[in-house]
Image (spheres, rainbow, N blue to C red):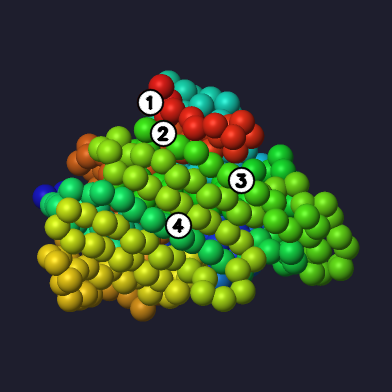
Amino acid sequence: MKELKPIRVGLVGVGNWATYGHIPALKLLPQYQIAAVCSRSIEKAKAIATEFDIEHAVSRVDDLVNLPDLDLVAVLSPAPEHAHIVKAAISAGKDVYCEWPLTTTTKDSEELLRLAENAGVRHFVGLQRTLGASSLHLSQLIRERYIGDVRSVRMHVSMGSFGPTRSASLEWTLAAENFSHVLSIYGGHFMDMLFHALGKPEMLSAIVATQFPMLTLASTGKEYPNETPDAFMVMGRLAGGALFQIQIEGGKQNLGGLQIEITGTLGDIKVLNERAFVTKHHDVIEAARGDKGAWASLLLPCSTKLIPCSDFDASVKDLAQLYAAFESDRRTGSATVRTFADAVELHRLIDAINASSRSGKSVSLVRER
């Protein structure tokens, strides 16, 4: 059997998430080879290329996407830069990965989906938590009716960041037009994970709030009016009839992380993690079945582990799982990864949440699909 050539990847953007997440994740997988890196600073691009043994270092996006032996462009820059980089990759006929949020508006994301489909390039988006081993396990448990039919689910996500003081690394999140806040980033990642496992919402009511009216930039001490939401709550009904409630909030000082409680007709499931992002460990999944059943932790089955063993943080493993799933989809024709189509659907869900909050009324999502 002929040995498959590795997928040659070019990275656009070399910030913390690239060096903490993408480069280790890709180097873990023999199916990939990092062939090029692009940064506005050619000195930084060359330094990263030297450190991680990457062949090409460039400072222009066009130079990267037009490398003839490149198979996949990974767009890792902040959200306001995504659209034009993804368009350049599509125009060059390259498969493309893009971080979530796909773009800063639903309209722009819809355009990227159309362009990618018309060009026939493969596309996927960085909703890696949904492809993590613990999330795949949760989906499997629900699909196999481990706790019977789902009656309700409650999810709470919180983090210390996105509070009244912003670090220098989050300065780009200040402007509302950058679409980089608690609802878009954390809401997007965790709602995608939850609804992928339990089914899509068919109606919702929401409150979107800005609880910290002023923001201080830690590096300068300068204050800015807060233009973005730092907390939201959503409740509604899933397509199968189950009820759901979601609360996500930034600036949490204690008891942060992830807590999910799922009520079924035959038992209950809890999903727990002490961190919402840059997670050290996989989510802990516990279940109790029957009347007053004892709680027990459920081990991750081998079927949910798509990557080689490593000591990386779970956040890096989740990303590696996403890349492994893309390679498998590319080779077999399966459809596992989260694509631009999933990103567009998530954009529309966030639009519906904002619309409900503004109007004070419930919003139907049936027509959105």
How far is the residue under mark 1 from the one under mark 3?
A: 21 Å
Label 4 or label 2, whichever lies nearer to me, is 2
The mark that comes first in sequence, 1 or 2, is: 2
Name the residue tied to disc 2. Answer: 203
**180 in relation to 218, above or below:** above
The mark that comes first in sequence, 1 or 3, is: 3
Name the residue tied to disc 3. Answer: 208
How far is the residue under mark 4 from the one under mark 2?
A: 43 Å
Label 4 or label 3, whichever lies nearer to me, is 3
Label 4 or label 1, whichever lies nearer to me, is 1
In the rendered image, is residue 25 in sight? Answer: yes
Query: Would residue 278 appear left or right of 3 to someone viewing this image?
Result: right
Secondary structure beneath label 2: strand
User: Label 2 crowding class (10 Å Cα cut-off): few <14, some 14-19, many 20+?
Assistant: some
Q: Residue at x 34, y 45 (%)?
A: 243
Secondary structure beneath label 1: loop
Query: Would residue 152 appear left or right of 102 to someone viewing this image?
Result: left
Name the residue tied to disc 4. Answer: 34
Name the residue tied to disc 1. Answer: 366
How far is the residue under mark 4 from the one under mark 3?
A: 40 Å
